[in-house]
Amino acid sequence: MGRDNDSYQQGFILLGFSDRPQLEIILFAFILVFYILTLAGNTAIILLSIMDARLHTPMYFFLGNLSFLDLCFTTTIVPQLLWNLWGPEKTISYYGCVSQLYIYMVLGSTECVLLAVMSYDRYVAVCRPLHYTVVMHPRLCLQLVTVSWLCGFLNSFVMCPQTMQLPRCGRHTVDHFLCEMPALIAMSCEDTMLVEAFAFALGVALLLVPLSLILISYGMIAAAVVRIKSAAGRKKAFNTCSSHLTVVSLFYGTIIYMYLQPANSYSQDQGKFLTLFYTIVTPSVNPLIYTLRNKDVKGAMKRILKGEKVAKET
C-alpha cells in the first residue's frame, strides 16, 4: 500500500462515458428517470408489505428484503454517476471509492443468495402447499435472510481488501462509471492472476451455487405442475413462480456474463452498459414484474389508495 499512498489524497477519476460526451446528457436523463422509478416502485413494495397484514407472508417478507436491497444498490451508485454525467468533474475520493466497492459487493452478493432463498419459498408453495405455513415459519425466513446477508458481507470483506491493495503504480483512472472490482483489478501494474483466480472461485460459489439451487427448485416445480390435472391449477402455479423466474433471468443473465470471465478478456465498453442494465434498469422493473401479475399486491395498493383500512392480524 505504500506505493499508492498518493491515492488517499488524489482519489480516482471515473472515466464513465466521457469518451462519448454527446451521450452523457441522454444517459443522465435516462438514469434519472429509472432511478425515480426504482425509488418509487421499491418503496411502494416495502410500504405495502408492512402496512397490509394480508401481505405478512414469507413471499412478501422476502420481496420486501429484495426491494430494500435494490434501493440501497442503486443509491450506492446513481447519485455519484449523475453528478459525474452532469458536469466535467469525474472524480471520486479514495474512501468514497472503497465505500462504494464494499457496499456494492455486499448488496450484489446478498441478492444472489436471496434470489435462491426466494426460489425455495416458491418450491414449498407449489410442491408442499399444505405444509407451507409450517415449513416457512417466521424464524426460518429470518434465518434465511440473515444467511443471505452474511454471504454478502463475507464476499465483500474477503475480496475488497485484496482488490484495493493491488499496486497501481500511480494510476488513478478507472475505466468505468463506478468503483467496480474488474475495472480496479485491470488498473494494477503487476500480475493479478492470483486475485483473479480467487475472485473467480468466489464468483462460482456466490453465483453458480445459488443459480444451481434455483434451477433445481424450478425443475421440481415444473415436475409438480405437469402432474396438476386442472388448467386453472397449472395457471395458478405458473403465476406463483413466473415473476421470480423473470427477475432471476434478468439478474443472473447479465451478472454471470460479466463476472465469470478473466479480467484480461473483459470489454470495458460492453461491461459499462451491462453494469448499467443490472444496476439501474433491473431494480426499476422488479416492482413492475412483481405487481403486474400479482393480485395481492394490486389489491393492497387499491385498498390503500382508496383509504380503506388495512386488514389487522389476529
Image (tube, rainbow, N blue to C red):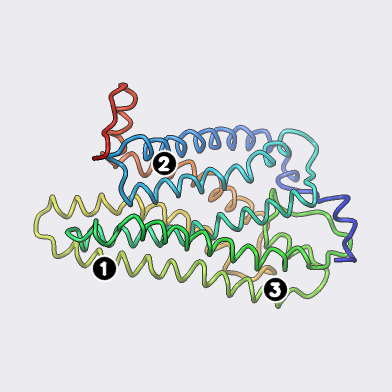
Q: Residue at x 49, y 47 (%)?
A: 282
Residue 135 location, quadrant: bottom left
- Percent across and percent down for residue 259 are 59, 65
- Percent across and percent down for residue 177 are 69, 48
Residue 20 location, quadrant: top right
Residue hosting label 1 = 220
Answer left or right for 33 relative to 123.
Answer: right
Point out the tag, 3 or 1, that comes first from the N-terminus: 3
Q: Which mark is residue 195?
A: 3
Which one is nearer the viewer's eye here, 113 or 260?
113
Point out the tag, 3 or 2, that comes first from the N-terminus: 3
Q: Which residue is drawn at 63% across and 62% down?
A: 156
Mark 2: amino acid: Pro
Check whether the beta carbons of the residues at disc 3 and disc 1 lie within 8 A of each other: no
- Percent across and percent down for residue 142 are 41, 56
Q: Which mark is residue 247?
A: none
Residue 7 location, quadrant: bottom right
Q: Which mark is residue 287?
A: 2
